[in-house]
């Protein structure tokens, strides 16, 4: 990637690693079989490729290959886990506990479940974005069937204490699901070791292709089942019908193999670049805030608020060259600022001023240096234009101003 | 989201950025929007008291590209107009000129409000 176009939006999606693409290519033409065709060599080749991919994906997360259900991506996996558990365990109870900072695929699935007679508790998080364990335990009732907590947050990179959460769930005999989309392949994620029973993740956040994801479903202690949400030929042990995406699974497997081998080195290199970016912006600009825990955080993410600068406007100063994302309302169709940052207790004004930087395997130091300069120039440009920055510098108490909300 | 050329031009080269002395009797200041909403515009006019002509206009805006472009355009348009002529500027004129998409129409509304608010402030000062 050239320095004129710098990609710091790896939490949205990652580019495919060329080694992943190389592994996939034969399965578009030379090996076109359907993995469910049991009676000819084309089918056998496809089945072998799927078996290998499943082993590689399972190996990355320390699971048994039989515990991997392939889906179209993490959104489908989230839907399958939540709705599938709600339906399968309806005799046991109807209560689900989750966090206000979860991904929309979890929140919206929970809303749908509420319409179907389920009860969902959406827990607040602490100021640093981390779950309050006491609050979580107190929310569990005899009707609770599932706790859903994401491993690492997509906007802030904040990592939840999954082991502690799992211990609470085990104590109360409640299933634990985690959307680990942002964590798998970048930090060690071992659901079985930790005590997570279902886990969603996807290839395209770990240098694999789009359109292929997985749901880990524990087979032993406990044996978990989910009601299928897509019916058909009974693929994936009856939990997810549909012809398997063979090239996608091959790519996912290759991406998992590479992630396992390179994760430690990648994380070390990328966190050094992230820290360089973050500390340069904090030292060269006034009134910059890090959103979410700095300690319990993914190595490649920083979410910063630039006070009195509107996020989308700021992005416009450099978005011909640098790709990032913002929690500003103006970047969303709803005109509401990021609900994740609001849940952390940020005022709407700081949420509007936020930018998420997510680095990746292919980010270079040169790119980070260019980004630092463009960000500093952009913030200074926007502050020179900002009436509230001027008022702040003059010592006006912005809280005391009577604003005309519109 | 793709921006129109005119929005980009006003965003990159905003006209009339700055601050007029709000203590002056012939300066009117409009401050509209709220930080919580992600948009604050401050638009100021300096009026020739004998002719009622707006001889200078300045703005500062906290907001997205469309908000900055709308207020920049507003200052450009009202300079040289009389106070009464400026009152007649409609937000839809701004929408049309900048080719704002529906989701950004509120930026033009805010710019119209900023003009009217600045004129109102000027008139209140004149009466006072």
Image: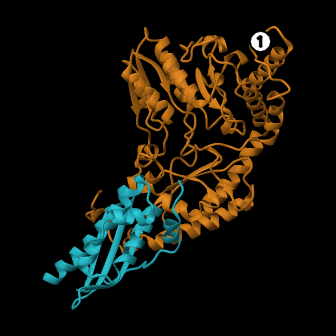
Letter of the chain in orange: A
Q: Which quadrant is the C terminus of chain A positioned in?
A: bottom left
Choose top left, top right, bottom left or bottom right for residue A144: top left
Apparent side of residue B94 relative to residue A56 in the rendered image (left or right): left
Residue ID for mark 1:
A37
Q: Which one is nearer the viewer's eye here, A197 or A77?
A: A77
Query: Where residue A189 sits: x, y (%)?
Result: 66, 31
Which residue is depicted at the point 47% across and 12% down?
A89
Query: Where residue A132 sits: x, y (%)?
Result: 45, 35
Say which chain tag 1 marks. A
- Above or below, A179 against B59 in this view is above
Apparent side of residue B118 relative to residue A338 in the rendered image (left or right): left
Query: Where residue A24 sits: x, y (%)?
Result: 80, 32
Q: Which quadrant is the N terminus of chain A positioned in?
A: bottom right
Q: Is residue A137 visible?
A: no
Which residue is depicted at the point 42% across and 25% down?
A112
Q: Could you tell me which secondary element the residue under label 1 belongs to?
A: loop
Q: Farthest left residue?
A: B127
Q: Farthest bottom residue?
A: B50
Q: Chain B hue? A: cyan
- Above or below, A336 against A237 in this view is below
Number of residues whose C-alpha sits closer than 10 Å to that of mark 1, classed few (under 14), some (14–19) or many (20 or more):
some
- Above or below, A345 against A205 in this view is below
Which residue is depicted at the point 79% across and 36% down?
A20
How are the residues colored?
Answer: by chain
Query: Where residue A79 sits: x, y (%)?
Result: 52, 25
Which residue is depicted at the point 49% across and 39% down?
A130
Q: Which one is nearer the viewer's eye here, A329 or A297?
A: A329
Q: Is residue A205 visible?
A: yes
Q: How many marks?
A: 1
């Amino acid at each position: 990637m050239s320095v004129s176009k710098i990609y710091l939006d790896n939490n949205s999606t990652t580019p495919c690693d060329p080694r992943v693409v190389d592994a996939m290519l034969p399965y578009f033409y030379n090996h076109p079989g359907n993995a469910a065709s049991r009676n000819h060599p084309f089918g056998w080749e496809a089945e072998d490729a799927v078996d290998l991919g499943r082993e590689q994906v399972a190996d990355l997360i320390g699971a048994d290959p039989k515990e991997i259900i392939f889906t179209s991506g993490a959104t489908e996996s989230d839907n399958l886990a939540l709705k599938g558990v709600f339906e399968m365990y309806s005799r046991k109870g109807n209560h689900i506990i989750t966090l206000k900072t979860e991904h929309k695929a979890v929140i919206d699935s929970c809303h749908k479940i509420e319409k179907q007679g389920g009860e969902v508790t959406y827990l607040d998080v602490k100021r640093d974005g981390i779950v309050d364990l006491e609050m979580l335990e107190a929310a569990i009732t005899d009707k609770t069937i599932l706790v859903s907590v994401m491993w690492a947050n997509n906007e802030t990179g904040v990592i939840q204490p999954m082991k502690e959460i799992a211990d609470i769930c085990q104590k109360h005999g409640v299933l634990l699901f985690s959307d680990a989309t942002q964590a798998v392949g970048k930090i060690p994620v071992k659901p079985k070791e930790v005590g997570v029973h279902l886990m969603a993740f996807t290839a395209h956040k770990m240098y694999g292709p789009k359109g292929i994801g997985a749901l880990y479903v524990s087979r032993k202690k406990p044996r978990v089942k989910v009601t299928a949400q897509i019916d058909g030929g009974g693929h994936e042990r009856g939990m997810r019908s549909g012809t398997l995406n063979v090239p996608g699974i091959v790519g996912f497997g290759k991406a998992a193999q590479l992630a396992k081998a390179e994760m430690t080195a990648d994380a070390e290199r990328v966190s050094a670049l992230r820290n360089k970016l973050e500390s340069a912006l904090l030292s060269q600009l006034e009134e910059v805030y890090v959103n979410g825990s700095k300690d319990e955080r993914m190595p490649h993410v920083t979410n910063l608020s630039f006070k009195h600068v509107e996020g989308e406007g700021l992005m416009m100063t450099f978005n011909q060259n640098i790709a990032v994302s913002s929690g500003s309302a103006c970047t969303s169709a709803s005109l509401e600022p990021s609900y994740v940052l609001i849940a952390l207790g940020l005022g709407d004004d700081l949420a509007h001023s936020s930018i998420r930087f997510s680095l990746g395997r292919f980010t270079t130091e040169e790119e980070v240096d260019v980004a630092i300069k463009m960000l500093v120039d952009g913030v200074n440009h926007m502050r020179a234009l900002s009436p509230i920055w001027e008022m702040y510098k003059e010592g006006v108490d912005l809280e005391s101003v009577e604003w005309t909300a519109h | 989201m793709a921006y129109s050329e005119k929005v980009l031009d006003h965003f990159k080269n905003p006209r009339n950025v700055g601050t007029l002395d709000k203590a002056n009797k012939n300066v009117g200041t409009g401050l509209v929007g709220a930080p919580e909403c992600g948009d604050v515009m401050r638009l100021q006019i300096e009026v020739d008291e004998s002719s009622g002509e707006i001889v200078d206009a300045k703005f500062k805006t906290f907001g997205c590209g469309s908000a900055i472009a709308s207020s920049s355009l507003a200052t450009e348009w009202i300079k040289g107009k009389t106070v009464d002529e400026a009152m007649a500027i409609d937000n839809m004129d701004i929408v049309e000129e900048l080719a704002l998409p529906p989701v950004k129409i509120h930026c033009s509304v805010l710019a119209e409000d900023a003009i009217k608010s600045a004129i109102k402030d000027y008139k209140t000062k004149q009466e006072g």
